[in-house]
Image (cartoon, coloured by chain):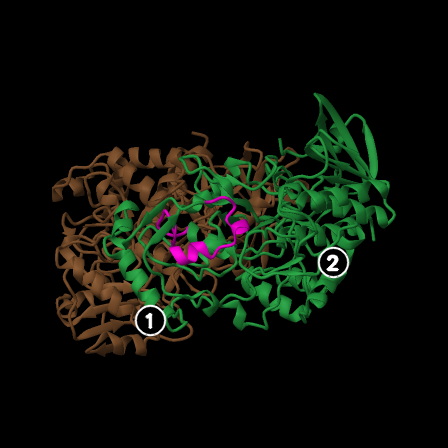
Chain colours: A green, B brown
């Protein structure tokens, strides 16, 4: 369905606007709002029944810094250079340095843009490793204070959370959609874009779409912005480009089918880093940090106080399955609200029993715990440099948690404990222009969010996808509007 | 330079043939020969001063099986199903099953095709792990007899080597180029193809090229076959698609610039698995197998009797640098010809000394060797399942070899010990037709070799790139000729 339609084949356009935005997640919403504010007549086409997309399913964390009012109120000094240093390492290697520089330099202003949507942020810090704090705290660590990043710059927390309980993506999208509507942007829901319309000169001048069995054509006087999301819901594309996610759970609204990427690539648009993925291993950080994460050989492989996305990537490439090993004292020290109802799956007086139950090499846990304890007694971790705050020799009795239980999953064949989405996509310039393989912009075509390859290299940190989706979505909207 | 040229912009064609083949490595040579044999008038355009390409720089191993005369003479029974089972696992996960099935089913016939070029194969086996045997033996193991592959099917060696000393790629290309010339195929060397020529209907009808400052146009009456190789020599493409290879040495003739991939992608052709790479860690298998490979944490990470490409992929993703640890008895048991002049870089009476010299966590080598010895004494390796043939407790004095010394490299900043090439490329059907993003063939356009994504999933085994390049090159040539 990604084959472009020649303008000559379009008998008549059913609708027309200056800027057409395809997809109403955070990137599409940001693009639509800024295009409208730049004076354009804007229409958003959304395949689902309403705005939201995968953004609305997310935790709602926003990676922002450089000295936001929240950071200042909590007592942290930050600047764009320190933020850049952290993200270049944590999202790298091989980040898009030009986009990342803009993102960091513009971060305080971007925070104010979110406040302008009506979002509020509590001026308090959640001070322990977590996928998502069980509190309303407005600020959280996202790996800045864990080795090796703690050595790059003075660690400063930059995870900003709109004030709500639990997942906050819905709130972000609720406010964004309301602001977009108030600004006078039109939205056609239940409208699936099927192809780009291209004129003789190769300019994208509209799209074809389908709504409730009806074929429609939309003309874009100034530009089309693709904000269709990634391709985690398209197994064919995963096989071709990002097989790491095959067979795992998806972080999406079920509609991240890569259609925008393929519609543009069919025109000769370039892609970038199509194999890069975000992946979350559902181990509970509050458990892992108090004990250890071991792989299928009974060996540690990461500092357990790392941002959970870091231990997730590491876990994905370990001989599996992985386990969280705790002792009784560690388990009992976890605040109840951080347990998410997860309980140990195995308990034993000796490590030998656990080696047998978990089918680990004989002696493996014995050796791993002995080495850990030897160093932990001195507050050291020469292998992975977990902070002394969390180091303590482990003593019988022991408990093991199946990480697949994290976030309330049922352990079984159907769950691997990994959930992810794709980070690769169309190559765009910092203003959202879609670039062709030879390097020139495809006239009339823009993109933002996970339909594009954004600031990321090999790594990922929570809040950088909503972050770069909105940041570069805004820029794409302004550029498409002709500003 | 990858932007397609409309036919209307070509004033006149300077040359014309039925089939134009771009690139004279093994895939281009195979395509040209079979197109000619199918009755087509064929012209090969090669950017370098003569035939060869990266194929001529290679070791010349060919992954073939299913019961070749060499296998039979040496005393091994093989069949296509066993070959498929091994390759599906070793090149996987996520191999191209359709192509792989054809490759295995056609392997005995393909072996005869190589003999038809005038290549001979000694009927003898080199029976130890090696990148390249120091003998003329015609058959070698390529991981079939190492865990976990030894459990999939009865292990059978399938590495076929044309009879020569050392690297054999030059011999293969020498014979292929001679056969192509004898068949009446024309070759224009020093001719760099700059763009595809496309008619109004979207059919590829020729190419533009540059030779010694002169711009030329070539018409292809039936089809153009892209056999331009991979993109390991193009750092921009590596950054965008296969960053694992950035900063490492390249296995190529220096001209694998991805130009064919980009010329086709600019037309909307689909790519597949652009992040997949072959990588060779230059550790000497003869050393590693008699001791252990440890990572920068002093821990083993692989069975050292694995195909060296397997330990290479594993090493690339370990915390580095990696080391080979041996004891005196192991070192002295290595045949001189397998040492390639490489000597240990460190020697010590105790593991503690080595931990300090190599900057490994204190106690790490002590624990690793203790666990290894505990099991090796019983002929077991519960961690990685190295064959009992190579298991023996290690005893002082110890020697350590810097794997970057393998193959005669100088240890230094400029060498990382990793050398690789790219496996991703254009999506083709089994007859070499280049497929567009929407899935239909691009009319008139074919591709083979490392300009395409072939049989490989995530893995690689020596001889599968020359193997699928020639096998699917032949099919592409026949198809382009209209057969």
Badge 2 is on which residue?
A111
The residue located at (36%, 70%) in the rendering is: A375
Query: In what quadrant of the picture does the N terminus of chain A appear?
Result: top right
Badge 1 is on which residue?
B409
The residue located at (81%, 44%) in the rendering is: A179
B332 or A409, nearer to the observer: A409
Query: From what the image shows, is residue A266 above or below residue B121?
Result: above
Is residue B104 part of the magenta span, yes or no? Answer: no
The number of discs equals 2
C-alpha gap between disc 2 and disc 1: 51 Å
How crowded is the residue under tag 2: few (<14 C-alpha within 10 Å), some, or many (20+)? many
Q: Is residue B446 left or right of residue A318?
A: right
Is residue A335 part of the magenta span, yes or no? Answer: yes
Query: From what the image shows, is residue A36 above or below residue A140?
Result: above
Percent of width and height locating residue A251:
56, 42
Furthest residue toward top: A213
Percent of width and height locating residue B391:
16, 58
A222 or B223, nearer to the observer: A222
Quarter location, residue B390: bottom left
* Residue at mark 2: chain: A
* Residue at mark 1: chain: B
Quarter location, residue A343: top left
Percent of width and height locating residue A443:
74, 46
Range of residues picked out in magenta: A317-342
Query: From what the image shows, is residue B429 above or below residue A161?
Result: above
Quarter location, residue B406: bottom left
Percent of width and height locating residue A296:
33, 50
SS at circle 1 = loop
């Amino acid at each position: 369905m990604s084959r472009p339609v020649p303008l000559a084949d379009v008998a008549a356009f059913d609708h027309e606007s200056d800027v057409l935005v395809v997809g109403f997640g955070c990137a599409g919403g940001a693009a639509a709002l800024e295009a409208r504010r730049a004076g354009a007549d804007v229409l958003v086409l959304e395949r689902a029944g309403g705005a939201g997309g995968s953004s609305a399913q997310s935790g709602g964390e926003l990676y922002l810094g450089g000295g936001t009012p929240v950071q200042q109120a909590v007592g942290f000094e930050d600047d764009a250079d320190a933020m850049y240093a952290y993200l270049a390492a944590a999202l790298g290697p091989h980040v898009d340095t030009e986009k990342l520089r803009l993102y960091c330099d513009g971060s305080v202003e971007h925070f104010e843009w979110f406040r302008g949507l009506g979002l509020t942020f509590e001026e308090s810090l959640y001070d322990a490793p977590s996928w998502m704090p069980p509190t309303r705290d407005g600020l959280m660590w996202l790996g800045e204070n864990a080795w090796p990043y703690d050595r790059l710059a003075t660690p400063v927390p930059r995870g900003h959370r709109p004030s709500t309980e639990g997942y906050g993506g819905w709130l972000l999208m609720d406010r964004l959609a309301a602001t977009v509507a108030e600004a006078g942007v039109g939205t056609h829901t239940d409208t699936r874009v099927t192809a780009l319309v291209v004129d003789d000169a190769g300019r994208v001048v509209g799209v074809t779409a389908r709504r409730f069995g009806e074929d429609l054509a939309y003309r874009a006087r100034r530009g089309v912005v693709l904000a269709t999301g990634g391709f985690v819901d398209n197994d064919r594309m995963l096989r071709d480009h990002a097989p790491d996610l095959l067979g795992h759970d998806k972080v999406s609204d079920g509609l991240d089918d890569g259609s925008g990427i393929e519609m543009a690539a069919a025109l000769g648009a370039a892609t970038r880093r199509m194999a890069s993925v975000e992946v979350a291993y559902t181990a509970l950080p509050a458990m892992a940090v108090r004990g250890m994460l071991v792989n299928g050989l009974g060996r540690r492989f990461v500092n357990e106080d790392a941002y959970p996305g870091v231990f997730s990537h590491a876990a994905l490439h370990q001989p599996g399955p992985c386990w969280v090993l705790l002792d009784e004292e560690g388990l009992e020290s976890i605040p109840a609200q951080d347990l998410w109802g997860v309980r140990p799956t195995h308990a034993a007086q000796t490590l030998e029993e656990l080696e047998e139950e978990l089918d680990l090499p004989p002696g493996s846990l014995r050796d791993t715990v002995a080495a850990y304890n030897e160093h932990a007694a001195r507050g050291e971790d020469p292998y992975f440099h977990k902070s002394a705050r969390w180091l303590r020799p482990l003593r019988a009795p022991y408990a093991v948690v199946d990480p697949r239980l994290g976030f309330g999953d049922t352990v079984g064949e159907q769950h691997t404990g990994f959930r992810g989405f794709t980070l690769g996509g169309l190559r765009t310039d910092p203003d959202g222009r879609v670039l062709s393989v030879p390097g020139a912009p495809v006239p009339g075509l823009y993109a933002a969010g996970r339909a594009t390859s954004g600031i990321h290299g090999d790594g990922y940190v929570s809040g950088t996808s909503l972050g770069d989706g909105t940041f570069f979505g805004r820029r794409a909207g302004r550029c498409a509007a002709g500003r």
